[in-house]
Each structure stands twice: as C-alpha cells, then as structure tokens.
Image (tube, grey):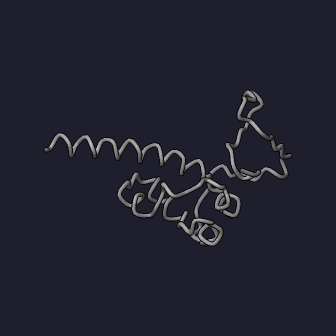
C-alpha cells in the first residue's frame, strides 16, 4: 500500500498487530495537523485523485450526511490512498472522513433496502 495508506495514530498506546507492516514516525515539525481544518476549495485534491473523484465534494456530502449525493459522486470507488489528504493545504482528514462516510453509507443503503422490501 505504501506510506500514504493506513491509519494515522497519535499515541504510542496503539498495539502493533499481525497486519502492521510499517511505522512512520514524524517529529513535531514534520507533523502538520490542524486543530480546526478548513477546506479552502483550492481543488488540489481533485487533481491528485488517481480514481478521478472529487474529494472536496465527497467531504462536503459526508459532513452533511447527503447519502444519495455520496452514491452519485462515487464514494465507494475511493481506494483511500491518502493522496488528497496529503496535498490538502487545509489539512483536512479526508481519508478518515471517507472511511466513516462509507460505513454510514452502508447503513443507509441497508435501511433503504429494508424500507423498500417492507413497502412491497
């Protein structure tokens, strides 16, 4: 997967498990997170997406739980490579947002399916 894949950890209390294949340790000068990240709509994330998605719109839809729009924008096609989060000057945690949105979208789709089956 490379260094952009995986989950960021902010504590040494997280265990190393069987599927752990690497650790990257950054100094405080190298770690560039933001306390209140904001999208400045620069579009850099769109330019680096290998799947040609629009991460800035996916992020907007995910924050507002706009599930039909997430489906149309192709959230499930996201491979969570981390390129968008890396290039983002606003330091948005895009990959984390997309992972959470995929879980919520799955729950939404199950509820919609159950609702349609109940209506028949």
Give the percent coordinates (x, y) of residue 25: 83, 43
* Quadrant assignment, res 7: top right
From the viewer's perspective, tell me whether residue 62 is left or right of residue 51.
left
What count of labels does the image hold? 0
Indicate whether 25 appears above or below 13: below
Query: Considering the image in quadrants, where does the C terminus appear?
Result: top left
From the viewer's perspective, tell me whether residue 77 is left or right of residue 35.
left
Give the percent coordinates (x, y) of residue 16: 75, 29
From the viewer's perspective, tell me whether residue 15 is left or right of residue 90.
right
From the viewer's perspective, tell me whether residue 56 is left or right of residue 88.
left
Give the percent coordinates (x, y) of residue 4: 72, 53
Indicate whether 73 appears above or below 116: below
Residue plotted at (40% across, 51% down):
65
Residue plotted at (30% across, 41% down):
111
Give the percent coordinates (x, y) of residue 27: 86, 46
Residue plotted at (67% across, 60% down):
83
Residue furthest left in the image: 120
Residue plotted at (34% across, 46% down):
109
Indicate whether 56 appears above or below 30: below
């Amino acid at each position: 997967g490379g260094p952009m894949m995986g989950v960021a950890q902010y504590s040494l209390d997280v265990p190393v498990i069987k599927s752990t294949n690497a650790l990257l340790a950054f100094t405080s000068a190298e770690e560039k997170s933001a306390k209140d990240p904001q999208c400045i709509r620069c579009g850099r994330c769109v330019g680096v997406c290998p799947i040609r998605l629009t991460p800035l719109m996916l992020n907007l839809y995910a924050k507002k739980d706009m599930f039909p729009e997430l489906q149309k924008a192709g959230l499930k096609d996201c491979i969570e490579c981390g390129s968008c989060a890396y290039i983002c000057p606003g330091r948005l945690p895009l990959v984390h947002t997309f992972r959470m949105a995929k879980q919520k979208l799955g729950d939404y789709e199950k509820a919609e399916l159950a609702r349609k089956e109940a209506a028949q």
